[in-house]
Image (cartoon, rainbow, N blue to C red):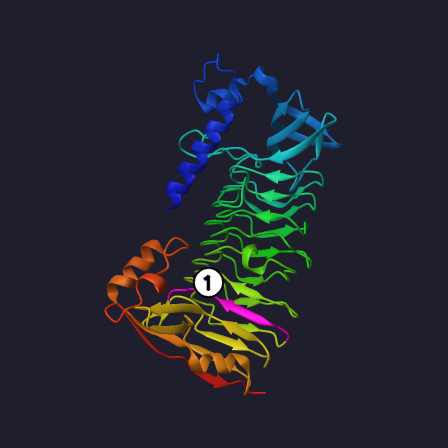
Amino acid sequence: MRKRIIMMLLLAAFIVSREKIDNQVAFVSARTFLEQGTQDNGIGLVTKENVDIAGRHYEFVQYYRDIEQKKIRLMSLKTKEDTLIIPSAIDGEPVEEVGMSIYEFGDNKEPFLPWQLNKQQVLKKIIISEGIKRIVMDAFCETEADCIELPKSLKNIGEDSIHSLCFYNSKIRHVIIKGSKTNISGYVFLDSGLKKISLPKNYQGKIGSDAFENSKLEEFKWPAYKSGATTKVDSGVFKNCKNLKKVTFPKNQKHIYIPNSCFYGCKKLKKLTFPASTKKVTYDWTPYADNYKMGPGTLVFKGKKTAVAGVKYEYNKKRKWKVLTVGKIIAPKNSKALAYAKKAKRVKWFAKRIKTDIKRYTGPEVNYVDEEYNPDYVKLAKMKYSILKK
């Protein structure tokens, strides 16, 4: 799947670059275009060595300059220092975007490293200055740094909310997001070395599908969303995050929505605990059964008044079940969560065929609760539950 995503994104980058060139200009290859540059349609490629920008010295800089709109997409910047500061302006013109297609412009053996002098250089910190609005394409793929700091002005990490590979296979261990409305596109941190992500307390941005898939993320603090809880976090966000041990949910939330396959493959994440002040929790489909433990096994509710919603299932239009795809519910005596658990079903058993299909196709495009819950492939049982000890 990752190869297909990479090829799709590279093709999109190729098409966008090509559209910016006048039809009369021969397009030899993306790399040739990078090396030669063009002035057609007001687009110019600038490459410099040993330059001073905003009082700092850099060994190398490369960027696209929109001559008509007088704005810049910074593609590469290199320094001998251990801290790299990406400026918000060059020669008086604003830098609005950061990123390039490093795999397209590599040497077919190794990708181009836009922010490092060589593979041996490990940056302590990368700081993207205020004013920059977007991180695009393969911006920080393969980059090795201890930390990167993203500004309040940043609108998007990635070109859209569906998919992007800005930090694919990066070795950046800590990402600090300062913007309360910075959106994280799908697949952004796929296969990355990300261990920690810091969001502002008032974070309201969207997090796209599979955003942190197969990363090294260890802990996550769920955003305190004010509204639109069911549309802010997409499916499979932490899929196969094998080091994820703890997820902390905020207090006083009207609705915490756990989307489809959100924690699929998080083998170290044994339970999810919701604060007593939480008004409602919706736990969408996650492939979990007694014989297929591929998600958190236990939901813990600290409050008596927290309402719970699982997956609604109707079989042959005669039998209606409420299904929670976990193994056990723990909640206070006489609580809404406990009352729901007493009526709900859990998945006791998956057929081998279904487990194989889930491994191949788990994601928002497949909903086995609707399609496969029948006695031939899946067995349901009463939900296990216990009273929360004070």
Residue holding disc 1: 263
Residue 172 is situated, as x and y percent measured from the top left of the image, at 55, 48
Residue 17 is situated, as x and y percent measured from the top left of the image, at 51, 26
For the record, the magenta segment spans 277-287
41 above or below 151? Answer: above
Q: Nearer the viewer, residue 282 or 23?
A: 282
Q: Nearer the viewer, residue 90 or 234?
A: 234
Residue at 39% x, 45% y: name it.
2
Q: Disc 1 on helix, strand or loop?
A: loop
Residue at 37% x, 59% y: name it.
367
Asked whether residue 93 is drawn in magenta, I would say no
Residue 320 placement: quadrant: bottom left
Query: The residue under label 1 is which amino acid type?
Result: Phe
204 above or below 167? Answer: below
38 above or below 100? Answer: above
Residue 60 is situated, as x and y percent measured from the top left of the image, at 62, 28
Residue 126 is situated, as x and y percent measured from the top left of the image, at 64, 43
Q: Nearer the viewer, residue 134 or 121?
A: 134
Residue at 58% x, 79% y: name it.
302
Q: Is residue 289 left or right of residue 161?
A: left
User: Callout 1: 10 Å neighbours few (<14), some, many (20+)?
Assistant: many
Q: Nearer the viewer, residue 348 or 105?
A: 348
Extreme residue in the front direction? 317
